[in-house]
Image (tube, grey):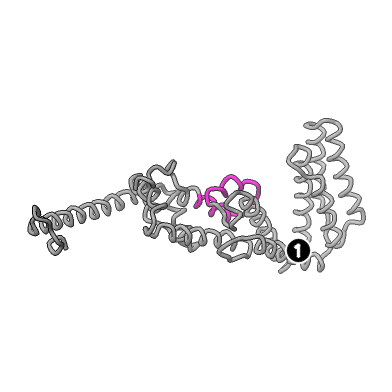
Amino acid sequence: FSGAQPISGDESRLTNALLGAGTGVVGQGIASGLGGVANRARTAISPAVQRSIEAAQRAGIPLRAAQVSDSQFLKTVQSAMDAVPLSGAGGMARRQQEGFNRAVGRTFGADEAYLDDAVMAGARQRIGQSYNDVYARNNITLDDEAIRRMLEIEGRAATNLTPDNAQVVRNQVQRVLDAFEDGQVPGARYQNLRGDLAEVMDGSATGQLVRALRGEIDASASRSVGGADAEALRQANAQWANMRTAESALQQVAGAGGNIRPSSLYPLVRNGSTAEMRELAQIGQNVLKDPIANSGTAQREL
């Protein structure tokens, strides 16, 4: 190619051809060297990160070469290339984000590339209908185990809260006991009771104890339901917990476009979600998160 190009009076076609050939050889050497770096870096990946890579592949999330390597050099190059036009990095990032959105959405029955408001509203309605269907067919019992744990919660409130706040928790315990005075309540009444308790739940110590109280009547409700309804309820509970985690993640800036930022999930899963969602949160931290502190200088120079 170099030998075929026009030359000026002080240039030599032969020299240009030799320089072009030499550059090709050096370039091939660099490419081969990078391949060796990548292979060596792959073997240095920790078991936890390797598990996340395998989980991402099972979930259908496309990964880049730098993300399946422990090479800081490759990660730095990939981070810089993300903003370079015609590199293909933008399209790959979009496909990866869509794959991650779909994987998160599947944990609550929404296999969509973007989790916008309409998708989330549809998921909430679908899961809510699952609850309605189960409880329309079943009465709910407050068993001895639930009552014992509720009284323990009341005791913790008396010990750890001010008298006024402890009285709030005590009032909610009495509300539950009054509702179950006859031993059983229809499923619809149980759902109304859950809504009443939700009005007292917040991030305070008092609200957290009321949340624990509601958790005990939920556990008793699960024990009241048997057969296929028990499995349907288990699935609805799991999907609801995952959906709530996704809703929290969508409150961040990326959520305006229906995207779940991969690194945002890990701090949220401790608030209640399934092992499947926790695995995706680990993928976000271990594999998809860009580890390079980025001010944009590298992209502008490149």
Residue 68 position within the rendered picture, expressed as x and y whole percent measured from the top left: 39, 53
Magenta stretch mostly in which secondary structure? helix
Q: State left or right for residue 191 relative to residue 1.
A: right
Describe residue 274's horizontal placement relative to residue 33 as left or right.
Answer: right
What secondary structure is marked by label 1?
Answer: helix
Residue 218 at x, y percent in the picture:
76, 54
Whether residue 63 is visible, yes or no, is yes
Q: Quadrant of the N terminus?
A: bottom left
Residue nearest the viewer, comparing 112 with 131: 112
Is 280 a magenta residue? yes
What residue sits right under mark 1 in the picture? 131
Callout 1 crowding tier (Cα within 10 Å): few <14, some 14–19, many ≥20: some
Residue in the foreground of this view, choosing between 255 and 40: 255
Q: Which residues are magenta?
A: 262-284
Q: Amino acid at mark 1?
A: Tyr
Q: Residue 238, located in which quarter of the rendered image?
A: bottom right
